[in-house]
Image: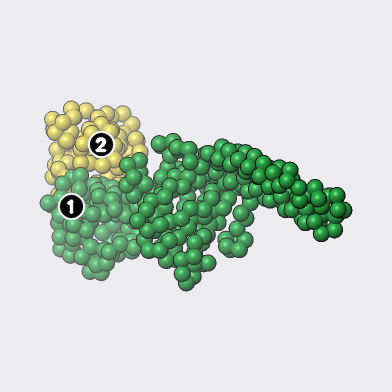
Chain colours: A green, B yellow
């Protein structure tokens, strides 16, 4: 599906790729027309009647066909082409989403930026964007020259070490778009692909919120307190660096019906009470009382453990 | 407290696990020490040292303490409004032993 050989290059899915594609077709049509004229002239020069040959080689034909026609046509084309593609260089809204993409041999770093240009989410080789909105890409390289190219969304632009090149992209609707490094960068350059996924704006916001929530849970105050209070020395929570085995495994403690080995219901209150002073509940058990914790800290820990479903 | 039942309240206290933090009169286990003992509640002046000790407020506090007393340590508990009233009735009825 994302095979580089199968990326459609003349099938625009947004305004930036659209103007480039339109210009491409116009250039192709012009080239075909000029080629037809040249072939016709060649045919006349070889097989035409003497009168036509003489006129073809005449001064006026040289002036008109050789100088006036190219100057007029190419000048018009230049003006038309620049105006057609001016959206590529027009300033994008200051509040547009920004993403820094850094070329590496032979993959891509992806850093979603906040409005101050600070990375707020890191990813690689895949970019999620809201459909119907311009997204500004800051293209950089960490090693050699790469070229970022997602043909259905914009033109290609080099990633040059030490420089930051700006490329706006936009997708009109939700879809998946393939990209490809377009500047030979050694070895498996041809296998340096890229994926852009455009979502409906609401779905995009939901995706980003879900990602942030997952990350916040990983770095929640509760998890940090869990670590700093020493809980991890005896308790394990899968997927974290808490790997103590002296006490009960808490990886799924939030979904357990009871606490303290089947002796109390599992709810916020009993969990706080157990953490704070389990000795008053189950005298002699191996867990020490944590009377140094404040009420807010007890609640944070209880919330964290509750979340371990 | 009309229609409230101290007997049902005692069962609700056991079901919710109030003893994890509180010593509850008439209950031998658990006798948690994190929160205040609830003995002699009928003669107590204030709930959590802040709220007037009225039956309706006590029932509301038992069920969702942060809602009636923001900042309190006691979290909302998984009991129904009826159960909360039963629990309040039990606390008023139970004598310190």
Q: Residue at x 22, y 41 (%)?
A: B74
**Could you tell me which chain the residue with mark 1 belongs to?**
A
Say which residue label 1 marks: A276
Q: Residue at x 48, y 45 (%)?
A: A168
Q: Secondary structure at mark 2?
A: helix
Any part of residue A271 in sight: no
Q: Residue at x 84, y 49 (%)?
A: A52
Q: Using the rendered image, report if marks 1 and 2 lie on a common chain.
A: no
**Residue A199 or residue B64, whichever sits in front:** A199
**Residue A86 or residue A219, whichever sits in front:** A86
Looking at the picture, how far across and down is residue A172, in whole percent? Answer: 57, 42
Residue at the limit of the structure toward the bottom, as seen here: A187
Q: Is residue A300 left or right of residue A65?
A: left
Query: Could you say which quadrant of the image residue B91 lies in?
Result: top left
Gap in angstroms between the C-alphas marked 1 and 2: 19 Å
Looking at the picture, how far across and down is residue B65, in whole percent? Answer: 25, 36
Q: Residues within 10 Å of mark 2 (few under 14, many from 20)?
A: many
Q: Secondary structure at mark 1?
A: helix
Q: Residues within 10 Å of mark 1 (few under 14, many from 20)?
A: many
**Could you tell me which chain the residue with mark 2 belongs to?**
B
Looking at the picture, how far across and down is residue A126, in whole percent? Answer: 47, 56
Residue A275 to residue B81: above or below: below
Q: Residue at x 25, y 51 (%)?
A: A222
Say which residue label 2 marks: B65
Looking at the picture, how far across and down is residue A309, in whole percent? Answer: 37, 56
Q: Is residue A99 left or right of residue A234?
A: right
């Amino acid at each position: 599906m994302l095979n580089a050989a199968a990326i459609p290059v003349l099938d625009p899915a947004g305004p930036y790729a659209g103007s480039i594609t339109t210009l491409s077709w116009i250039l192709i049509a012009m080239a075909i027309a000029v080629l037809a004229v040249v072939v016709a002239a060649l045919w006349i020069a070889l097989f035409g009647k003497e009168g036509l040959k003489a006129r073809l080689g005449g001064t006026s034909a040289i002036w008109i066909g050789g100088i006036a026609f190219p100057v007029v046509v190419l000048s018009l084309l230049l003006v038309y082409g620049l105006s057609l593609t001016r959206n590529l260089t027009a300033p994008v809204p200051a509040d547009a989403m920004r993403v820094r993409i850094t070329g590496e041999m032979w993959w891509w770093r992806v850093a979603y930026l906040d409005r101050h240009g600070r990375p707020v989410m890191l990813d690689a080789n895949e970019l999620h964007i809201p459909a119907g909105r311009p997204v500004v890409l800051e293209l950089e390289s960490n090693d050699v020259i790469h070229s970022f190219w997602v043909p259905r969304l914009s033109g290609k632009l080099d990633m040059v070490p030490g420089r930051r090149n700006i490329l706006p992209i936009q997708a009109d609707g939700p879809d998946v778009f393939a990209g490809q490094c377009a500047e030979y960068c050694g070895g498996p350059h041809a296998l340096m692909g890229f994926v852009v996924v455009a979502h409906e704006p609401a779905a995009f916001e939901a995706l980003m919120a879900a990602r942030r929530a997952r990350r916040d849970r990983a770095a929640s105050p509760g998890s940090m307190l869990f670590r700093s209070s020493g809980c991890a020395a005896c308790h394990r929570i899968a997927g974290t660096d808490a790997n103590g085995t002296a006490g009960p495994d808490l990886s799924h403690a939030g979904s357990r019906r009871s606490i303290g080995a089947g002796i109390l219901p599992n709810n916020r209150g009993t969990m706080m009470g157990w953490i704070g002073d389990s000795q008053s509940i189950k005298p002699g058990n191996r867990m020490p009382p944590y009377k140094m914790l404040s009420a807010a800290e007890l609640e944070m820990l209880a919330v964290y453990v509750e979340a371990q479903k | 407290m009309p229609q409230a039942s101290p007997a049902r309240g005692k069962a609700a206290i056991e079901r919710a696990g109030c003893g994890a933090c509180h010593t509850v009169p008439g209950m031998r286990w658990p006798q948690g020490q994190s929160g205040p003992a609830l003995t002699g509640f009928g003669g107590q002046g204030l709930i959590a040292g802040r709220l007037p000790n009225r039956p309706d407020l006590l029932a509301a506090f038992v069920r969702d303490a942060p809602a009636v007393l923001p900042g309190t340590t006691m979290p909302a508990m998984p009991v129904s409004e009826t159960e909360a009233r039963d629990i309040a009735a039990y606390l008023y009825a139970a004598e310190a032993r």
